[in-house]
Image: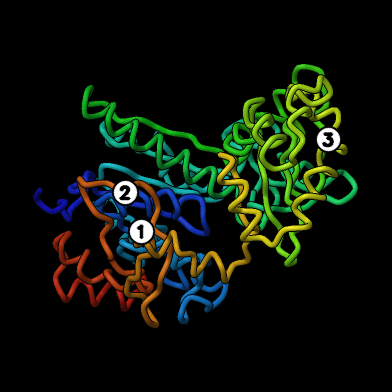
Amino acid sequence: MSPPAPSGPLHGTLVVSMEQAVSAPYATRQLADLGARVVKVERPDGGDFARHFDTYANGTGAHFAWANRNKQSLTLDVKAPAGRAVLDALLARADVFVHNLVPGAAPRLRLDGASLRDAYPGMVVCEISGYGTGGPFGDRKAYDLLVQAEGGLAAITGSRDRPIKPGIAVADIAAGMFGFSTMLAALLHRQRTGEGATLEVSMFDALADWMGYPLVVRKHGATPDLTSGMSHPAIAPYDAYPTADGRLLAVSVQNDREWVRLATAVLGRPELGTDPRYATNEARVAHRGDIDAALGAVLARLDSATAVDLLHRAGLGAALVNDLDEVADHPQLAARDRWLTVPAPKGPVTAPLAPPVTSAWHTPAGAVPALGEDTDAILRELGYDDAAIADLRAAEIV
């Protein structure tokens, strides 16, 4: 079998982005990982502010290192006429334009979907925002924390009295995923019809969709239980239980067949498998306390390795609750080569590889760019000579 093509399925696709933080950069990084050329247009006076959140990734901001490999950086003052001329020359060649500018900025700059599609009917324009266009929240600035709060995620992760924000930027990542997937769909639509598309992706819409279970329950008149810890409001047993060596073991029983196996092979009480108090999932949820006590008592007598082996031999799901060190050194990630190391401004950085594993292509190991690293090369590509580039620099346009 021949080796996978290094270019990727989006080779030849030019993506121009005006992006910052996580949502849009995460979407375009996935396009870049598939072989698209992504030109990241940044302000000359500092660029994407995520560059400067910290220096944890070998001197580079960790968020920035994760979300910006395989890209080029062009510094440009797009408000200056000469800077806008550069941007227009670049957009004339682009297949996709992506932005997550603050509300109102894109129309003022004539970089909204309607303006760009009028000039470039075949372009795919992806606009990522906090709350979308229109509605009472349409003009609000939004960050991940604010959308998690407004969207109820913090309340169901914690409680009304003590809301808890998950430890990653869930709203940003959700919007980035929808931006990525819908841009792929729009490119396929363009291939078939010749027509571009304007895509409006809001963080609030994305999070609302990911909140599907509790919102559907509430929309239909019931109130989902707010469970504590790692338990689930609609499934039991489903929680993390202490083992004899002090580890926490997550156990999930998803159906009645698995319950019978748990009762027989783990609890040693096969009669519980058909006991009407526990035989169905709804019954088990109603008697969650009894089940947790019985399972907890068994696991508390076993060390974690023995407990995992017992559950797996019974055909049941179980996983240790790992800390970050254990995940960073996880044997499954190492065995399947799921880390990618790429150059970065202050030294190489390593980040996880996103799915899929495929025989058709491989993820390029392109650099995380320094601010403006590719400016001169891109300007020359657009026809600017050394004197013209020097003039742009003297005017602080690039």
Report which residue position mark 1 lands on.
336
Dot 2 falls on a residue whose secondary structure is loop
Residue 376, quarter of the rendered image: bottom left
Residue 243, quarter of the rendered image: bottom right
**Does residue 314 sit above or below 45 in this rendering?**
above
| Dot 1 and dot 3 residues touching (CB under 8 Å) | no
Task: Give residue 217's position: percent from left, percent from top.
Answer: 74, 23
Task: Give residue 219's position: percent from left, percent from top.
Answer: 75, 20
Task: Give residue 92's position: percent from left, percent from top.
Answer: 23, 45
- Residue 357 bears which disc, if any? 2
Of mark 2 and mark 1, the one earlier in the sequence is 1
Horizontal side, residue 97 vs residue 383: left or right: right
Looking at the picture, which amino acid does disc 2 mark? Val
Dot 1 falls on a residue whose secondary structure is loop
Report which residue position mark 3 lands on.
288
The crowding category of the residue bearing disc 1, from other C-alpha atoms within 10 Å (few below 14, some 14 to 19, many at least 20), is few
| Dot 2 and dot 1 residues touching (CB under 8 Å) | yes
Looking at the picture, which amino acid does disc 3 mark? Arg
CA gap between label 1 and label 3 equals: 37 Å
**Does residue 217 sit above or below 376 in this rendering?**
above
